Image (cartoon, coloured by chain):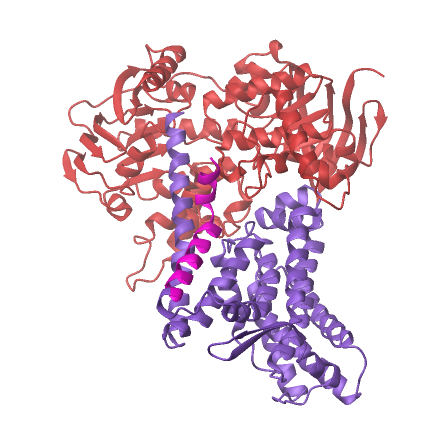
Chain colours: A purple, B red
Amino acid sequence: MKTKKLLKRNEFYVAVTIFLLSLVIQLRSGQFFTANNFVDLARAMIIPGMLTMGVMMEIISGGIDVSFPAISMLSMYATLELLLKTEYDGPVALAFAVATMIGLCLGLINGALICWLKLPAFIITLGTSSIYLGFMQAVLKSHTSSLLPGPVSRMVKSFLLTVTNQELGISSSLPSVFVFLIIIVAFTAFLLKYTMLGRGIYALGGDPVAAERAGFHVNGIRLFVYGFMGALAGFVGITRTILVGSCQPNSLIGYEMTCIAAVVLGGTRISGGHGTVTGSLLGALLLTMVSNSLILMGIPTYWSKFVTGILIILGTGVSAYQALKRQKQLAANVLED
Amino acid sequence: MSDVMLQISQISKAFGGVQALDKVDLEIRRGEIHCLAGGNGSGKSTLIKIISGYYKADSGTISIEGHDHSKLNPIEAIMSGIQVIYQDFSVFPNLTVAENIAMYDAVASKQKLQNWKRTAETAKNTMDKLGITIPPDALVEELPVADRQLVAICRAMVHDAKLIIMDEPTTALTRREVDKLFGIIRILQQKGIAILFVSHKLDEVFEIADNFTILRNGKKVISDAASNVDNDKFIYYMTGRAIKKENFTPKEIRKDKPLFEVRDLCLEKGFEHISFKVYAGEVLGIVGLLGSGRTELAESLFGLLPSTSGDILIDGEAVRIRTPQDAIRHKIGYVPEDRLTEGLFLGQPIENNMMLANIDALTTKRKMIDWKTLHEHAGAWRDELSIKMGAMNALITTLSGGNQQKVVLAKWLEIQPKVLILNGPTVGVDIGAKYDLHAYLHRLAEAMETAIIVISDDIPELIENCNRIIVMKQGRLTGEYSNKEVTEQELMSAVTAQKEEADEN
């Protein structure tokens, strides 16, 4: 019974794929199961790992978001500009706080528009994405710059641990901001599983009318979900600057699709109501491995998009096929009844 | 404190000039099963919404267990023990049975955290109380419809329900599931819970209800014990007209050449070796349980599921039906099982829905739509079938179920069908409209132009309307009966006998 249940889940197939892919990479390059590679993967997981938590929550609630890269970049750029202009030199926490607040406001704008106009979230966020990006480029006249405020700049060199490969003489370091990934993942997992707000998000995604009849404040839940994504995106903006070591206001354009792909690959249903933290993390890990580790096998990086596409179709296809079989089974039961 | 659970007196409610309820009284005692009946637009839904606190009455009083609650709101209604089970059940398909059952209670308790242990306990206790065994960790979307309804009933029970309102609870259920539901309703009754049961299926009302109240045009017509009335009286109260229930007997059957014939028709995984004839003047009934292949047969005749072998003959000539377009070209009309998903375009006006099947004929020489003729034809069908509607260009969803079904029928009558197949034609249709539809089918049969086939599992309906009834079981035809000779019980056992046989296999 337990194994049967496991076989129904997308997470299982993603985990198997990850395992097989890592074996193949190991056989071809001998470089996968090394401390260096693990640290590099963990580092590469920070941004997609955080963002998928927010997107997953939105998709579970029956919505979607394509504006979070724009929110992230705008919050990041505005915060850095502000700190540079004021020559701020206090704790770096303020940079995170300011960017998170800006992101929260932008996310709440999304949420409010969705509640108020009752338009599909896709259309609203498509619009606001363009507005946020345009605002950053036109009003703030954004440009790439390596000049960072002091506190942010100092964070760039803050690592949890460093591993060095003696043979090759390469060392990889895990940035301190990795801690935030763990905190955010733990928070999201707790929220979704153990709070009534989290259960409300699932309920809303399952059937909005029923959720309202059950006494959930559905608009409040929607506001929370989009606000959370916005705040998270703002936070990620600063995190990313620290990882990259410079201010790159256009670097996340198009990243929404990668995150949505990771979430869907991890078993979250695009129609809402279903999704797990484990699944989304596995999805993000698989896509990160494809874009990070294919190069270890000597496959040119531009193939990674191709492989990602195949994985999305296969990965979601397996569970869709299972669901179809289940439905047929159900119909057959009716026949017997 | 007396044992009156709910007392409603002189309730009135108007919506912008339309008097939805006019001085209605209703009294329900503890442990009473009370049936609320009435045609569409009789005010049933308005009354339910007032009892559950969603609407405020313009005048009149509501008292629950002797306390005045004339300004009832939804929360107060739930707190007083009133629970509504909606037609769509309002369960969460993506959540487990246990979480669904415990959900209302969890939300109402204003707890911030989800307590999984308590959820499991609540679900188990409630299901035990009612003798229901559904795996608590199954997802609701994996359950059959009847089980979803049981989940909704359990959920209502959790909240210390004293009055459970069920809005047409049997519409989507098979006979066997209805029996199970009634068993549970009786358990609820023994626990002193009052049930307000909304239905317009007469046999069910007489089977389960202690008392009944009938509304018509917003007024209470009668409130009495179910044992005090019979079928005919009940229908009279509901429709305001005496409807004679008389089994259909064709005035004349032209036996020389069948209008429609099926020879040895087979569909892989659907049905096999189906042969029958329909003569002019007849209404043929096909009865079978869910899964007997009855719907597959209908869809096959209409080209939705092209048959794998066999012949279809219209007026003695073999025709090829591979697609619905073929069927329409050969003047076959099909009133499907579920009008909402298969029979109508819900986002479209009444008129477009009505004229759709014949749209090719309603064009001018330049291949533009001939709106003038179209309007005329639509108006003619409205009068012919006495469809109650406002404007022709209003959305189809503004009509009641019965009138929607008449529109579906009109759509096919407009092509002047040689063959008309009706699958469950009166599901969710109120008695008045049901009578109209039946009467029209009889007239259509007497016009000798159309072969009429009614497919259904509603045995009384078939006996009343079809002069010949054939039984379908496990994809085969297993018997033929005349409605003059067969009784409901005989036909029922012919249909269910196959069931036991199937179980043994």
Q: Is residue B106 left or right of residue B272?
A: right
Which quadrant holds the C terminus of chain B?
A: top left
- At a point 65% along the width and 89% down the height, the residue shown is A141
Residue at x-position 37% and y-position 72%: A297
Front residue of B294 and B367: B294
Which of these two is toward me, A186 or A78?
A186
- Residue B488 vs B357, above or below: the answer is above
Q: Is residue A303 above or below residue B303?
A: below
Q: Quadrant of residue B268?
A: top left
Corner quadrant of residue A334:
top left
Q: Is residue B117 left or right of residue B337?
A: right
Residue in front for this viewpoint, B374 or B272: B272
Q: Quick check: can you spot residue A102? A: yes
Residue sitting at 64 percent across and 71 percent down?
A236
For this view, does B17 lie left or right of residue B457? right
Q: Residue furthest front?
A: A166
Magenta stretch: includes residue A19? yes
Residue A263: where, in percent of width, then height? 52, 59
Image x and y of residue B457, in percent: 40, 24
- The secondary structure that most of the magenta stretch takes on is helix
Q: Is residue B135 magenta?
A: no
Q: Is residue A201 above or below residue B130?
A: below
**Picture quarter containing residue B460?**
top left
Residue B377 visible in rendering: no
The percent coordinates of residue B92 (x first, y second) are: 58, 41
**The N terminus of chain B - image quarter:** top right
User: Is B98 situated left or right of B380 in this image?
Assistant: right
Q: Percent from the top left, x then y, of residue B213?
A: 65, 21
- Which residues fall within the magenta stretch? A1-26
